[in-house]
Image (cartoon, grey):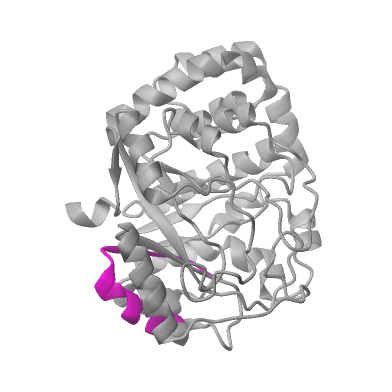
Amino acid sequence: MFLNIFQQHEWAAARQSIYDKTAADVERALARNHRDLEDFKALISPAAAPYLETMAQISHQLTLRRFGRIIQMYIPLYLSNECQNICTYCGFSYDNKIRRRTLNAGELLREVAAIRDLGFEHVLLVSGEANQTVGVDYFIKALQTVRPHFANISMEVQPLDQDDYERLIQEGLYSVLVYQETYHREDYKLHHPKGKKSNFNYRLDTPDRLGRAGIHKMGLGVLIGLEDWRTDSFFTALHLQYLERTYWKTKYSISFPRLRPHAGGLVPKVTMSDRELIQLICAYRLLDEEVELSLSTRESPVFRDHAIKLGITSISAGSRTNPGGYVVDPGSLEQFEIHDDRSPRVIAEMIRKQGNDPVWKDWDPVLQ
């Protein structure tokens, strides 16, 4: 279990180690063909800031070598905004007085039709955490409804038990995204005071349960803004390397969600500049040539246009972050505000103009 490895690392010590890195450490990491976690610390450290252009060039070359010019496109489909958790950063938080909605089968099919009309064959199903109304049985029915219409189905829902994941995989689930939010145990509790999500260890063990269940791909990440992004990113990389060694048949992706405005309005504890996010994206690519790197519509059009040249392999487009947001109930509350509201076709054209090929479904199932 990753928990055993995690407990061998102390947050403050890891943070100090990152901030102690020097220009010599950065240059040593850049000169290597294969980099370890100490190199990763150097590449995400303040000392690496002057080397961003070199990092970007290497990241671009490594991405071309492994992924070619393919940029995978996906879209989220929100099933429900019902949630029993109190989370300080989320518009769906239990203590927010909002109108709650869960899509029924007919409404789900209307959303599916709208998404298919946009051209997508890869959909990400998303919900709040309300096990009594939006639990495993609901997810199974949702997968059975959606599966005939898409080549690839991912989910970003509450952490589940291993046998639940096994049932969902049998229904066609290909990938699961599960973000730790922050690896800082004490601050995690501050941001999750009520609900099942407050159980730090259970959430930390979720990728292990997914790996044992035999999931094809899983996505990791933290919510950038809750804690020091450099230290959280180190723990994410530590987690990624453990999973790659332990569940080597599974593929992995990293996402970079920066805290965005929402109902409830948490002010980020830490801000990350655009240059720092580029630095982090490049550092992950220099550490791991195989991992997929994903960027959502939380980011601005200008930033996303620039970032896909430097290591990003997957990008969302046309996103709505509310249940029924495409046709059923466009006015319902969004989980967070999107920043890039360009249409999927415009995004695809932007990708082509940069010399890349937009792909509307995950390429892995095609190769199996």
Q: Residue at x 42, y 32 (%)?
A: 311
Q: Is residue 243 visible?
A: yes
Q: Residue at x 57, y 57 (%)?
A: 179
| Horizontal side of residue 40 vs 15, given as left or right | left
Up-down relation of residue 101 to residue 297 (above or below): below
Q: Is residue 147 magenta?
A: yes
Q: Tally the numbered discs.
A: 0
Q: Position of residue 240 (x, y in %)?
A: 49, 46
| Horizontal side of residue 180 vs 152, given as left or right | right
Quarter assignment of residue 32? top left
Q: Is residue 36 magenta?
A: no
Quick one: 171 or 91, which is closer to the camera?
A: 91
Q: Position of residue 141 (x, y in %)?
A: 38, 85
Up-down relation of residue 7 to residue 34 (above or below): below
Q: Position of residue 230 (x, y in %)?
A: 66, 36
| Horizontal side of residue 248 vs 156, given as left or right | left
Q: Residue at x 40, y 66 (%)?
A: 212
Q: Which residues are magenta?
A: 139-157
Q: Position of residue 296 (x, y in %)?
A: 51, 48
